[in-house]
């Protein structure tokens, strides 16, 4: 996990390629442990690293694999991260589908995440999903809906404990 954390630090302060290299290294180092929870988490993070490094198709494939295995992620890992990995992967998937030129699929993913109150999506991942929704609305020239997404994003950013939303 330390190797991975350092790689993530590199992604925000330096090279996405370095982040990907560290994510791949962390997956390789964790594999012999045979821990399904850690392996599933490493796969999820690897999918993110692929995206950050610009490998949309590979990131989308890894994201699908990670979503299929998200149930293997244990409570300890979820507690360490502090958020629902499934929501993160779904929001990331919507972005990937948009980047891959598959807006209808991206909208379907967003509808399942944002349209179901039982999902109880935290502010950070709801904001990630709303950003994709706003982009889809812009592509479809639905200015009013896009503005509504932006207003909700701004509301989510106010007073949240996560620094991601304050940026």
Image (cartoon, helix red, strand yellow):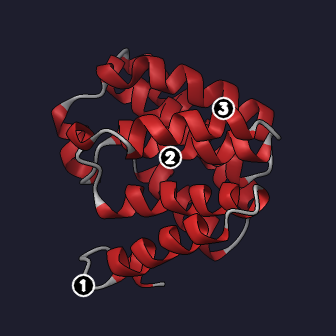
Q: Dot 3: within a 10 Å radius of its alpha carbon, few (fewer than 14), some, or many (20 or more) residues?
A: some
Give the spatial CA distance, label 1 vs label 2: 22 Å
Residue drawn at the location 23% of the way across and 50% of the way down: 80
Residue at x 63%, y 27% (from the top left corner): 62
Q: Residue at (68%, 54%) from the top-left corner?
A: 136
Whether pointer 1 and pointer 2 mark residues with C-beta atoms closer than 8 Å, the reply is no
Give the mark nearest the N terminus, 3 or 1: 3
Residue 49 visible here: yes
Numbered badge on residue 159? 1
Horizontally, residue 8 falls left or right of residue 162, namely right
Q: Is residue 96 left or right of residue 86?
A: right
Task: Report the residue marked by disc 2.
Answer: 91
Dot 2: element: helix
Determine which quarter of the picture holds residue 72.
top left
Q: Are marks 3 and 2 in contact (CB under 8 Å)?
A: no
Secondary structure at badge 3 equals helix
Report x, y in % for residue 55.
80, 42
| Cα–Cα gap, marks 3 and 1 | 32 Å
User: In percent of the image, x 42 and y 24: which residue is there?
Assistant: 39
Q: How far apart, in angstroms, are the residues tagged by discs 3 and 2?
A: 12 Å
User: Mark 3 — residue?
Assistant: 105
Q: Nearer the viewer, residue 63 or 115?
A: 115
């Amino acid at each position: 996990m330390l190797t991975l954390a350092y790689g993530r630090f590199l992604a925000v302060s330096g090279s996405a390629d370095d982040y990907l290299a560290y994510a791949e290294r962390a997956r390789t180092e964790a594999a012999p442990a045979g821990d399904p929870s850690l392996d599933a988490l490493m796969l999820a993070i690897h999918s993110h690293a692929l995206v950050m490094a610009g490998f949309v198709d590979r990131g989308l494939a890894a994201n699908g694999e990670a979503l299929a295995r998200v149930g293997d992620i244990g409570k300890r890992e979820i507690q360490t991260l502090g958020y629902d990995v499934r929501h993160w992967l779904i929001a990331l998937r919507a972005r990937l589908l948009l980047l891959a030129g598959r807006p209808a699929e991206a909208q379907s993913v967003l509808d399942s995440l944002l349209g179901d109150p039982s999902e109880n999506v935290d502010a950070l991942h709801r904001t990630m999903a709303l950003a994709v929704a706003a982009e889809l609305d812009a592509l479809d020239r639905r200015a009013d809906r896009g503005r509504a997404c932006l207003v909700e994003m701004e509301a989510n950013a106010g007073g949240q404990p996560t620094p991601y939303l304050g940026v």
